[in-house]
Image (spheres, rainbow, N blue to C red):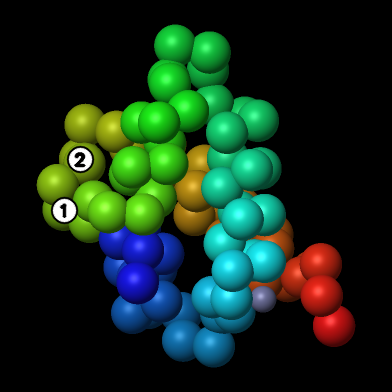
Amino acid sequence: MPGVLNEYLKNNPGVCTCSICQEDILALTLNELPPHYAVSLAGEIFTEVSLELIGGKAQIVSVITKNIKRVSNNPRHK
Ligand SMILES: [Zn+2]
């Protein structure tokens, strides 16, 4: 289970975590991050690092969290 997504799910059960939704969340997040954040960095945070370990990356976390909400409220699949 992805790190940031897993942390979010602890407080928000019921959010879809299928591969389609995960890809959408990450794609939206990468589109919004400032250019100096490498794609690999955002992907790593999303998939492997827990919120507790990335306190200095609050901007990324906030974007990911926002996009989790966006995708879960309007998933690409039915
Ligand atoms: Zn889904």
- Left of 45 or right of it: where is 70? right
**Which image quadrant is residue 22 in?**
bottom right
Please provide percent x and percent y for residue 45: 33, 44
Which of 28/43 is in front?
Answer: 43
Secondary structure found at label 1: helix
The numbered mark at residue 55 is 2
* Residue at the left extreme, as displayed: 53
62 in relation to 57, above or below: below
**Residue 51 in view in this figure:** no
Quadrant of the drawing holding the C terminus: bottom right
**Which image quadrant is residue 24 in?**
bottom right
Amino acid identity at mark 1:
Glu
**Residue 18 in view in this figure:** yes
Amino acid identity at mark 2:
Gly
Secondary structure found at label 2: helix
- Left of 38 or right of it: where is 77? right
* Residue at the bottom extreme, as displayed: 14
All told, the count of numbered labels is: 2
The local crowd at label 2, few if under 14, some if 14 to 19, many if 20 or more residues have their Cα within 10 Å, is few
* Residue on which disc 1 sits: 52
The local crowd at label 1, few if under 14, some if 14 to 19, many if 20 or more residues have their Cα within 10 Å, is few
Please provide percent x and percent y for residue 55: 20, 40
Which residue is depicted at the point 43% across and 20% down?
A: 37
Which residue is depicted at the point 66% across and 42% down?
A: 28
35 in relation to 45, above or below: above
Which residue is depicted at the point 81% across and 67% down?
A: 76
